[in-house]
Image (cartoon, grey):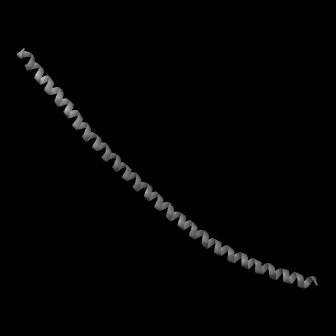
Amino acid sequence: MEVYWQILIPIIAGFVSAIGGYFSGRKQQTQDENKSSLENLDKSLTIYQTMIDDLSKRLNDYIADAEVKFITYEKKIKEMQVTIDNCNFIINKFAK
């Protein structure tokens, strides 16, 4: 009977030790996975924030450029309207 205990005690101790090691290692592994996920999320957010900032700057540049072009075209339209009015005046003057 004593021989069984000499064999059984190390087997049980090894089994209990393996289970304890598994659960403590699993907890550490889960923490490492969570930390890695958070780091990846932070990197992704940084990349997206950079992209958004760049797109915002480009959009503002396009809007500013469009405003300048609009003002320029508006001036040209007014100049053309004056020219058309002058031409109409001359046409009406000679038509009479």
Task: Name the residue at 81% across, 81% down.
Answer: 85
The spot of residue 24 in percent (x, y) is: 22, 37
The spot of residue 18 in percent (x, y) is: 19, 30
Task: Name the residue at 11% across, 24% down.
Answer: 10
Extreme-front residue of the structure = 1
Is residue 28 found left or right of 54 in the rendered image?
left
Residue 4 quadrant: top left
Q: Is residue 64 above or below residue 13?
A: below
Task: Name the residue at 25% across, 41% down.
Answer: 28
Is residue 61 found left or right of 50 in the rendered image?
right
Task: Name the residue at 83% across, 80% down.
Answer: 87
If the image is split into quadrants, where does the N terminus sit? top left
Q: Is residue 32 above or below residue 57?
A: above
The spot of residue 50 in percent (x, y) is: 43, 59
Q: Is residue 90 above or below residue 59?
A: below
The spot of residue 60 in percent (x, y) is: 53, 67
Extreme-right residue of the structure = 96
If the image is split into quadrants, where does the C terminus sit? bottom right
